[in-house]
Image (cartoon, rainbow, N blue to C red):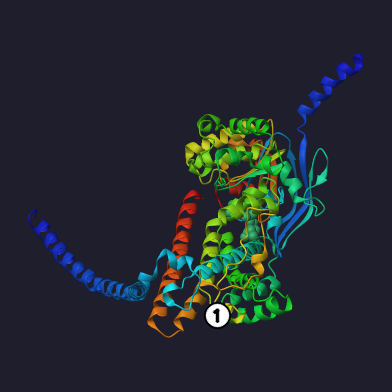
Amino acid sequence: MASLSPSISIEATGSGVADIRANVARRRRWDVLFAAFGLLATSVGVITLLALFIDLLIDGYHRLTPDFFLSFPSRRASEAGILSAWVGTCLVMLVTAVVGVPIAVSAGIYLEEYAPKNWVTTLIEINVSNLAAVPSIVYGLLALGLFVYALGFGQSVLSAGLTLALMIMPVIVVATREAVRAVPHAIREAAYAAGATRWQVTRDHVLPYSVPGIATGVIIGLARAIGETAPLITIGALTFIAYLPDPPLSTTPPYVSFDWLWSGFTVLPIQMFNWVSRPGTAFHANAAAAGIVIVVLTLLMNAFAIYLRYRLRKKINW
Amino acid sequence: MAAISTAVPTAVHAAHAAPKVKSSIRKLNFFYGHTQALKNIEMDIYEHAVTALIGPSGCGKSTLLRCFNRMHDLTPHTRYEGEIRLYPDDVNIVSPDVDPIEVRMRISMVFQKPNPFPKSIYENVAYGLRVRGVKARSELDGRVEAALRGAALWDEVKDRLQEPGTALSGGQQQRLCIARALATDPEIVLFDEPTSALDPIATASIEDLIISMAGSVTVLIVTHNMQQAARVSSYTAFMYLGELVEYGPTNELFTRPREQKTSDYLTGRFG
Ligand SMILES: Nc1ncnc2c1ncn2[C@@H]1O[C@H](COP(=O)(O)OP(=O)(O)OP(=O)(O)O)[C@@H](O)[C@H]1O
Ligand SMILES: [Mg+2]
């Protein structure tokens, strides 16, 4: 009696385990297969990006000297540089950020916190999302009519900055709304219950807690704007500038000047485009070098966005 | 002279004998869109006492509580009908003519789930004062300390007021929320199942706190837990399907319910 039942049960368990293992192995196969496929798919993306970047590096690395950053464009490829282009990029981005960010963030917060939920708001919401998908050259056409001619801003840094601001605003509005929506309702209730007005709730809670998400949207928008070429060519960016706009700050009164807003402009991708379209490998090396600068700038901005999100999120846990 | 000096103590004594009404609910209906969640509620809330709202899930306890600080104004398509009169000034706090901010400055609330702001302990408690425009550091310091003492939290946090409120334990967070509600010297404090997310020890400390608060502030508490209602409250209201079924002193309602529905609920036959 005593010896019989244990031997039976051990045998039964033994074959049971074998069955289970076979079953697991069979199902595991798909795990392994999908993991392999996923790795391959990921590699295609990463390797393509790496290959492109390495190609740029090989072509343009030797041109990345301090002189390259401090020289104006020139008919001689070896003397040409990106001074006017990167200064132009900085000034245009300044206008884009100063105009686009406050308007887009306010709009996003208004839509989420203040606007009554009715069909008008829904219509606006749908349109804003659609605007984010409008091709950038369409913004260029709009800006050509509106800023350059109708408002008379001309082919200036101001027009360029406003064009790109228009272009990135939908992205920032959407990011702002998502960030604002992620603030728990319980926090809003707590603040309202303490006697706060809508504006106080927005200023003290909703806005501060959604800064990580908003900042991410802003940086991704700006990173997109920095590489934009088509709309700026449409509004008449110059391709050869051998001067700098008036500096915004000076040591003599009145210390600040806004003349640079009216200056003609070029930006990095346009300079690059210009060099690519010229015959001769020497200019192509310049184009590659300018490309490296744009890629590095974009990657740095994205890295900063990730860092910011990580740092700020860590401070806020509900 | 002599007549006045003898008359005054008598008057005070009389006031103690008959509990003073802090607020009276008259013919109150409340609607979420077309759904009526409260039906013709009539009820007096007594000053400096704890009143408990009990009843099965979905009967409208939270809905009634949130009428008192006009929290429903944050939800679109909601509508109040009737009156909640607040004394001594006799204003109807659910009237559209009364600003909900004004109401929330007089009546504060503690929620079911602790909801401290992701700010420092100090700023959590000071928030109600800050939105009112109190800036003087000395006044803020004094009232933050008083509120934290009132919430039995001062000794635990006095050395780390600048740490985030979200880093406290669940029970401490709820006491922080109570301190936040007390800091503004409210006339009524509303509690919506304040201990349902807490362990028994934290629950006991919150209950002690609520008992100690009565006497200086009027408390209205929603609870699922009948023992809790019996322990902390002087008056209990039993609600069912949006109606007030029975309301009276807690010991009477629990020992001699007048309505069949109440006794069925108390004996656990439904709910
Ligand atoms: N925002 C809302 N929109 C529509 N109906 C709602 C809303 N909130 C609550 N209700 C309804 O109102 C009724 C009362 O809800 P309420 O939250 O007041 O119940 P409660 O007594 O607090 O229940 P519980 O004990 O589960 O918290 C319920 O039937 C509920 O479905
Ligand atoms: Mg409830």
One can see residue B243 in this view? no
Residue A67, horizontal then vertical, whole percent:
44, 66
Q: Label 1's element?
A: helix
Q: Position of residue A199 (x, y in %)?
A: 69, 53
* Image spot of residue B19 (x, y percent): 76, 32
Which quarter of the image is occupied by the N terminus of chain A?
Answer: bottom left
Taking B49 as reference, is A226 left or right?
left
As drawn, the residue found furthest toward the left would be A3
Indicate if the residue with disc 1 has its beta carbon within 8 Å of ligand 1: no
As drawn, B190 above or below A261: above
Task: Tell me which amino acid carries mark 1.
Answer: Ala
Ligand 1: image quarter: bottom right
Q: Is residue B131 visible?
A: yes
Q: Tell me which corner region of the image, top left, top right, bottom left or bottom right, holds residue A170.
A: bottom right
B196 to B205, vertically: above or below: below
In this rendering, the count of numbered labels is: 1
Disc 1: host chain:
A
Closer-to-camera residue (A273/A227):
A273
Occupied quadrant, residue B183: top right
- Residue located beneath label 1 in the image: A230
How many residues crowd mark 1 within 10 Å: few (<14), some (14–19), many (20+)?
some
Q: Is residue A112 above or below residue B174?
A: below
Horizontal side of residue A49 vs B132, given as left or right? left
Extreme residue in the bottom direction: A279
Observer-nearest residue: A175 or B129?
A175
Return the residue nearer the eye: A102 or B177.
Answer: A102
Residue at point 61%, 54% (across, down): A206
The reply, left or right, for residue A77 in relation to residue A267 is left
